[in-house]
Image (cartoon, rainbow, N blue to C red):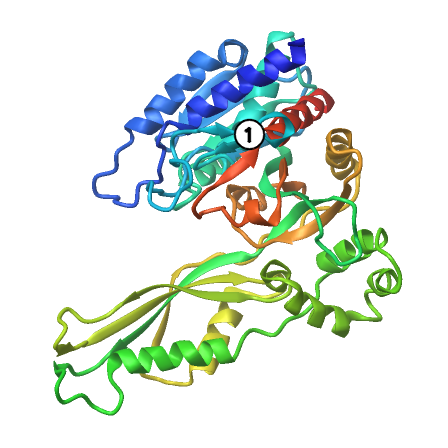
């Protein structure tokens, strides 16, 4: 076994140990169990001694871990971030138990199964592995470097928000920020055969709405023409029948042109003349996949439904929760007006539960972008690096108000099937891409 092989296998063993710690985001705020989060922090101290010897660690907002790596000189600080909380999972329906961290296959086909492999302990561990090696070798970054591991990204994101407030209070100027997000993907566009490294330069706004109907109840044997539940169902159908308008934005146009340049004619001609063929490309994106459709429009998903208390009684209150991802160029207010117009029923009350407008678009050129692109190319030489609009929310949105260079990229190759396991059953990653992710952060940290 070579030295690199030995390092890789040791890193894999550490990731498996961290996945086995059930840091599930507490949903019961009245009595949360934080013991797994405390165990995770203690385990990091044992697994990564050089980091804890060289860097200063503090705990923010209860369980978010913030490490400061003092730089050689004053300048804008960089932040490498990930989160270590995970969404819930039971053994039901999983090929391998979600917290067993089992490895199957051999050689390049080895796969690590478990909740958090992709979202987001895999990224957290690659940062830790690279930082541990650099710290042990005596490396010092040019400017301060912070490692941030959030504890509640999957719920409220209060940890990252508190860190931003803390750094502002201390007068820290934040420059480069890198969080989870895009990845190295294949077959993103027709006729484009090279892998694509998509880097999120913005993210859609994440807002929760409720639709509520309240009306007279009664015995289920004599229902009115339109019950509360039927009225709510009609509202949901109307929303489905009136989707938000699809449109291009500058980020998506740049992505299409840069990726499309590696395609084959005649589509290459279309992709590289995106402004001429904008209406056609919008239509193509809407039909190509759910992922591409989400890039060009605001999306609405009904995620929770609640109604009556008894099988033979009319519901006096029926409610739906909408998870809305707002496209860049739009706002929470504009989104609410569309919902109300589409539903067209004054008896269906539309209310905002939590609101976030889309994140500002970060710089897509310049020295910081180039530094990131070079680091990606060093790890994935055949990949085309391109900006894109991220559809999922991350803790990095908290930094968008203090930095123009906030990026979202997970340094892993992910197939469409693997991306489909995020927040779902059978989350997994190829072991080899985890090793490549460590090399990515090795190179990135060396450039900071």
> Is 319 situated left or right of 240 in this image?
left
> Is 319 situated left or right of 162 in this image?
left
Q: Circle 1 sits in a helix, a strand or a loop, which is it?
A: loop
Residue 100, placed above or below residue 7: below
Question: What's the residue at 26%, 34% (across, down)?
Answer: 33
> Is 328 situated left or right of 281 in this image?
left
Question: What's the residue at 61%, 20% (across, down)?
Answer: 130
Let me know if residue 415 appears in the view: yes
Q: Nearer the viewer, residue 292 or 297?
A: 292
Let me know if residue 69 appears in the view: no
Pointer 1 residue: 105
Question: What's the residue at 55%, 29% (across, down)?
Answer: 105
> Is 335 situated left or right of 283 in this image?
left
For the C terminus, the image quarter is top right
For the N terminus, the image quarter is top right
Question: Picture coordinates of residue 341 (x, y %)?
Answer: 47, 82
């Amino acid at each position: 076994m070579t030295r690199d092989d030995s390092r890789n296998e040791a890193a894999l063993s550490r990731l498996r140990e961290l996945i086995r710690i059930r840091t599930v985001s507490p949903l019961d705020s009245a009595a949360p169990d934080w013991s797994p989060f405390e165990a995770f922090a203690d385990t990091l101290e044992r697994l990564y001694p050089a980091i804890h010897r060289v860097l200063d660690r503090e705990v923010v907002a209860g369980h978010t871990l913030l490490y400061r790596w003092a730089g050689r000189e004053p300048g804008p600080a960089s932040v490498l971030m990930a989160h270590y909380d995970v969404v819930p999972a039971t053994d039901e329906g999983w090929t391998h138990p979600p917290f067993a961290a089992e490895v199957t296959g051999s050689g390049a086909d080895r796969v690590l199964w478990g909740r958090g492999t992709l979202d987001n302990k895999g990224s957290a561990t690659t940062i830790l592995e690279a930082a541990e090696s650099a710290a042990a070798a005596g490396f010092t970054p040019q400017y301060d470097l912070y490692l941030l591991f959030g504890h509640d990204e999957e719920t409220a994101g209060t940890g990252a928000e508190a860190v931003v407030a803390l750094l502002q209070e201390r007068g820290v100027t934040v420059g480069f920020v890198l969080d989870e997000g895009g990845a190295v993907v294949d077959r993103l566009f027709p006729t484009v055969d090279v892998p694509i490294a998509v880097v999120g330069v913005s993210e859609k706004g994440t807002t929760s709405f409720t639709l509520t109907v309240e009306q007279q109840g009664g015995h289920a044997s004599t229902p009115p023409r339109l019950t509360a539940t039927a009225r709510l169902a009609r509202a949901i159908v109307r929303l489905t029948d009136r989707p938000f308008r699809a449109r291009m934005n500058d980020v998506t146009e740049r992505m299409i042109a840069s990726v499309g340049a590696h395609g084959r004619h005649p589509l290459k001609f279309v992709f590289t003349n995106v402004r001429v063929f904008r209406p056609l490309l919008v239509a193509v994106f809407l039909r190509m996949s759910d992922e591409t459709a989400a890039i060009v429009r605001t999306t609405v998903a009904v995620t929770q439904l609640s109604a009556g208390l008894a099988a033979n009684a009319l519901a006096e209150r029926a409610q739906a929760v909408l998870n809305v991802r707002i496209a860049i160029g739009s706002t929470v207010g504009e989104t609410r007006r569309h919902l109300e117009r589409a539903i067209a029923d004054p008896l269906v009350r539309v209310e905002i539960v939590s609101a976030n407008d889309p994140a500002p678009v970060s710089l897509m050129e310049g020295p910081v972008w180039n530094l990131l692109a070079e680091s990606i190319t060093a790890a994935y030489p055949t990949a085309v690096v391109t900006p894109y609009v991220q559809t999922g929310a991350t803790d990095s949105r908290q930094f968008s108000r203090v930095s123009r260079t906030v990026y979202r990229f997970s340094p892993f190759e992910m197939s469409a099937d693997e991306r489909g396991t995020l927040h779902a059953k059978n989350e997994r990653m190829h072991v080899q891409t985890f090793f490549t992710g460590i090399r990515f952060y090795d190179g990135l940290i060396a450039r900071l």
